[in-house]
Each structure stands twice: as C-alpha cells, then as structure tokens.
Image (cartoon, grey):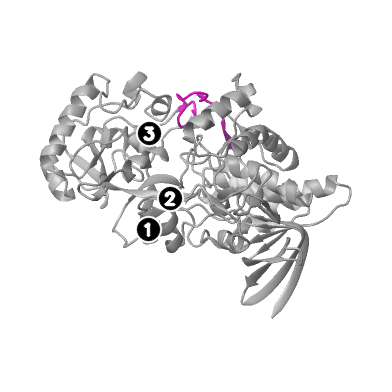
Amino acid sequence: MTSELSADVVVVGSGAAGLSAAVSAAVALTESGEGGSVLLLERSDRLGGTTAVSGGVAWLPNNDHMRELELSDSPERALDYLRAISLGRADPALLEAFVAAAPEAARFLEAETPLRFSAAGRGNPAGGVLPFPDYQADLPGGAANGRSLDPAPFDPSALGDLAEALREPLPYSVSWSGGGLVLDSGEWVGGRALAGALIAGALAHGVRIERGVRARRLIADAAGRVAGIEAEREGDVLRIEARRGVVLAAGGFEWDGELRREWLRGPVDALLSPQGLAEGDALRMAMERGAALANLGEAWWTLAVRLAGEGDGPEDAQGELRFLSGPRSLPGSILVNRLGRRFVNEAVNYHDIVRAFHVFDPGAFTYLNRPAWFLFGESYRRAYGLLSAAPGDPDPPWLQPAPSLEALAAGCGIDATGLRETVVRFDEHATRGVDPDFGRGEGSYDLATGDPSREGRARTLGPIGGPPYYALEVHVAVLGTSSGLRVDAEGRVLDVRGEPIAGLHAAGNTIAAPTGPGYGGGGGTIGPALTFGYLAGRTAARGG
C-alpha cells in the first residue's frame, strides 16, 4: 500500500539539527511572503533523538550571552581556535560559516522558540560551580568560559500530549547537571529542555511532525533534483513530496556495525547514543544520489565503564554503561594500561583522551593502551565515591576492593611491578603538586573539572595513597559519529565532484563535522548541529 504526503520542505530527524532546520525553514517560508509547509519525520515513536538524552549544552562561539558575563570573543579568535583543534582537516569555508552563523543561529532560535540560553559556568561532580572552558582552552583563540551555553529549564506543559513522546534520559546520562531529568517544579533541564523548547517552537510555526516514519530513499524528478522521500510506516510505503527541498538530520551510523568497522579509525567498545536510531539511513540515501563523504575515521569519542558484566560487543549490556568523564579529573586517581603504566593526562576532555587509546604498537601488533583501567584508592573512595556509589555507601558488586596493588594487578591482569612503580612515582610527584610525565593540572580544562574545594593543581592532582585499591576497566565509547556527508557553507549536500545536489541539504551528525576532528568544548556537537540546521533549513526553504 502506498500513501502520499507532501510539504515544501521535508526534514528527517527530530534532534537539535532537525528541529533547528524545521523552525528555520518555516520562518523563511513565512518571510518569503509565499508561505509554505514544513514536515518533520521521526523514525521512532520518541522525539528528540540523541539531543534529548544529552546534557543539552551548545558550543556557540562569539555568542551574545558572553557579554552578560563581561567576556569578550571575536570571529577571529574563534577561527584561530578551530583551526588549531581541527589539525588542518576541516574545510576552511565551513569553519568560517559556522563562526559567522553561530551567534545568529542562537539569536534566531531564542527569538522564534521558547529556548533560552545562559553562560554561567558548569556544575562539577565534586560540587560547586567553575568556569566552563573550551576543551583545549590554552590553544590559540581558546576561551576560558562562555562559549558553552546551557538551555534554561523548560515547562513541558507547553507541548500538551506530545510531551509524553519526548525521549527519556538513559541510565548513563552524559550530563553532570542531570541531562534530561525533571526538576521538582516539573520543568525539564538539559537535553530534554533543549529539544522540548525547539519542538514547541516548531509547532508554533506550523511544522507538522510525523512519528514512526523511517526514510528509506530519495526521490528525484526528471531533472535530477531531489523532490521527495520514499519512507516506511508500519509496513506501508509512503511517497513524500518535497517541493522545495529535503533536509537530512537523522544522525550518524554508530549503530550499524558494518559502517562502524569500515569508517571509524579504531576499536569501539561501547555506544552511548539511543539504540537503533543512528544506523546510517540518511548517509546511504544521499550516497545513492552521488553524495561525497568527509571526515572519515572520526566520531564524538568518550570513555565509559560497565557496572556489571561484560557484553560481547558495543551493543551489549548498554544499560550497564556509565559515562566516565568528571571522575577522572578528581585528585587521587589515574589511568593505567596492561603494563601498569600511565599513558595520558587523565584530566583531558572526554573526546581527545580517546586518541591515546588508539595508539598502535606495530612491534607487539596491538593497541598499546587497550585494555586500560581507572584506578584509585581508599582516600578517593571516601572523598568522592564513584558514579552511583556515594562516599560512605557499601561497595557495590561492580566496585570490588583489593587489599594491595599486587592483588589489584592480579585481579585485572596488570603487570604488578609496573603498577607499583607507577603509583609510587605518581604519588611522589602528586604530593608536591606536579606531574612531570603528562602535565596534569597545567591546563585550564584540568582545573575547571577538578575538585573546586581545592586550589591550583591540587584540584586534580593528589596521591593515590593507601589501600584498599579499586580499578574499573575503561572502554572506548562513541556518543555519535562525525564522519558523514560533505556539505557546503549553506548546508547543501555536495556530490563527489564538489557540486551541490539540487534539493538536498543536511546537518547534525549526518554531515561530516564542520569542525573536522576537533571538539570545541561542552556542546561541541550540538552547537554546530543547531547552526547548520539553521542554515540548511533556510536554504531549503528558498529552494537552494
């Protein structure tokens, strides 16, 4: 059976990129004086995509809210920073487009939706509030605070019955502030606040939302222009006309094992995005029309631990996963490999730290730092706890104490001699507040994510101390992929010869990240997604 739907602009995906595109397209159609319709398709029965389960922060350089904190920024500084973190692998035109449009996109979304941002620093796992610096703030153009914006709490009653359709937070919420949780007032915060406010704005501008519709193929007209989508819903085939354009914002491909093996640069042990959403549908659709790919090998990387049991692959035992970021920055903890050696500054941001896990030893023909363990002692356990094990709680089954470093090493399969030498050396230097091996505590990000009750390098540097000792195996995880479709500065998808594919636009994790392999700061995925969604929606509405 074939059903028919139509709109001027059809958007695929209900995360930050898709919602931004839908609002942008709707407003552009209204402003054109001709009017028109926007249809947003969501594959699942839940709205919000990965955005809804995230912390909801958006990295938007040179935004207006920085002025409220008497912070300065400029396009030139932002470009210097993005050039530094992208390692020469980002399209200069996309960097310039992002920096130019980011503050404009933020203003637009705050004007046209209930979304409101703030830039006031971030909470910390040890308590307190510290500035929220860029993830490589000490590189040229880096900012010590203000580029990462938090969404204000959102009252879901504005969505009516549709509030029940918002995706709920996952057990391993990636936000220190409780991304997606509900305040005592009933308001949403974090990713659900961001997605909820954008959905409310889309509805206010007449965007039609259809759930349970999985886009499968692009439809082209006689001239080769993308003019619609073939989709599926409950066994039916739908042919959906897009009179002006299609915007693909359906996420990446991390849940497709074949694409993950082919396109990502190193091993993946765990997936921290909602299961079954990002299977590469949008990429395959566009590739069938000759779309080019870029930024291959890259993802939005992080580290995770499993609280109980071990699955056979990254899809298994997802509910046991927990995001491991803030705890690594607290004093009295280290990461070690199977040789018992440290191999990285443990307080580095969650994206860039994974580079150290993908180091390959050609002699041993293995990844040198996989497996690895997060290690700490009794003083850390008493002061900070870990994840769901609060200070003073009995040790849970997933956190087993060891009476000595040798016993810990034996239980984990770590070289005991190397481990003892490492801990002795680390403790000796950490007691004096220095880390001559990896410079922990010397960076702005290190200090901002450490213990705010301490001063200087002591925020992140402190000795492991005495037993009992604890260790959890650390897994390389993916929040989403950043390899994807190549687009131009207006969000138009490019073919393999660098020419725009007429009628086809894209944003979010469906596209090759505009920042290349770089991750600007907190919200380094959502900021570009909102911005290029804004650009792509506007361009599609204009028939570009």
Expressed as whole percent of the image width and height from the top left, the position of residue 100 reads 66, 32
Q: Dividing the picture into quarters, in which one does residue 504 lie?
A: bottom right
User: What amino acid type is highlighted by mark number 2?
Assistant: Val
Q: What element carries label 3?
A: loop
All told, the count of numbered labels is 3
134 inside magenta stretch: yes
The circle on residue 89 is none
Main secondary structure along the magenta-highlighted residues:
loop
Q: In this view, does 317 lie to the left or right of 528?
A: left
Q: Counting residues from the N terminus, which is met first, the one under dot 3 or under dot 2?
A: 3
Marks 2/1 in contact by CB < 8 Å: the verdict is yes
According to the picture, the residue beneath numbered tag 1 turns out to be 314
Camera-side residue: 33 or 399?
33
Residue plotted at (15% across, 45% down): 409
User: What amino acid type is highlighted by mark number 3?
Assistant: Val
Residue plotted at (55% across, 39% down): 57
Q: Is mark 2 on a helix, strand or loop?
A: strand
In the picture as drawn, the residue positioned furthest to the bottom comes out as 1
CA distance separating discs 2 and 1: 9 Å
User: What amino acid type is highlighted by mark number 1?
Assistant: Pro
Residue plotted at (38% across, 32% down): 126
According to the picture, the residue beneath numbered tag 2 turns out to be 478
Few, some or many C-alpha atoms within 10 Å of disc 1 (few <14, some 14-19, many ≥20)? many
Q: Is residue 473 visible?
A: yes
Q: Is residue 476 left or right of residue 399?
A: right
Q: What element carries label 1?
A: loop
Few, some or many C-alpha atoms within 10 Å of disc 3 (few <14, some 14-19, many ≥20)? many
The circle on residue 348 is 3
